[in-house]
Amino acid sequence: MSLLRGLTLLLLCQALGEVLAKLTRAPLPGPVVGMLLMLALLNWAPLREPVQQASEGLLMHLSLLFVPVGVGVMTHLHLIGEYGGRMLVAVLLSTGLGLGVTALVLRAFLNREARRAAQAGEGR
């Protein structure tokens, strides 16, 4: 029963996120707004357990969520033959760009933490 309650909470947060994104014309997609809402609600202990059970259940069957993608790829195989090279370049460039930005952000955070630690050491 707790699994069903957790799935319901996840879907309600997503739906509420969609509604809030539409009403406020937020620059974020509805599911992202719903995820932020869920993050805030997870601080409330009665919601944590059902959501945890639902997420564990979904993660156990995560591979099933890739079946529609695989079917779509097989259905449109001719498009991969036609645009495959371009898609490969786009995937490689976007992956490299994402890794690069992540590395720069991590470096900035680590430098900031090192400065804070040095300032805390000087303050003693």
Image (cartoon, helix red, strand yellow):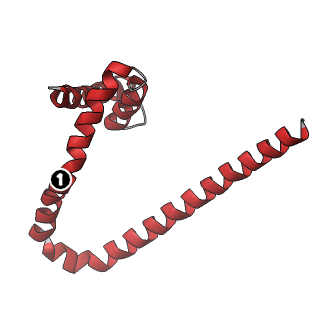
Q: Residue at x 14, y 74 (%)?
A: 77
Above or below, 63 against 122 in this view is: below
Q: How many marks?
A: 1
How crowded pointer 1 is (Cα within 10 Å; few <14, some 14-19, many 20+) is rated as: few
The residue at which mark 1 appears reads as 65
Q: Residue at x 55, y 57 (%)?
A: 102
Q: Residue at x 38, y 32 (%)?
A: 33
Q: Residue at x 14, y 26 (%)?
A: 1
**Left or right for 83, reference 45:** left
The location of residue 53, given as percent across then percent down, is 25, 35
> Which of 75/47 is in front?
47
Task: Give residue 23's quadrant in the image.
Answer: top left
Above or below, 35 against 23 in this view is: below
The location of residue 24, given as percent across then percent down, is 39, 24
Above or below, 54 against 80 in this view is: above
> Which of 20/68 is in front?
68
**Left or right for 107, reference 31:** right
Q: What type is the residue that disc 1 sits on? A: Leu
The location of residue 85, given as percent across then percent down, is 31, 80
Above or below, 55 against 16 in this view is: below
Task: Give residue 19's quadrant in the image.
Answer: top left
The location of residue 42, given as percent across then percent down, is 39, 26
Q: Secondary structure at mark 1?
A: helix
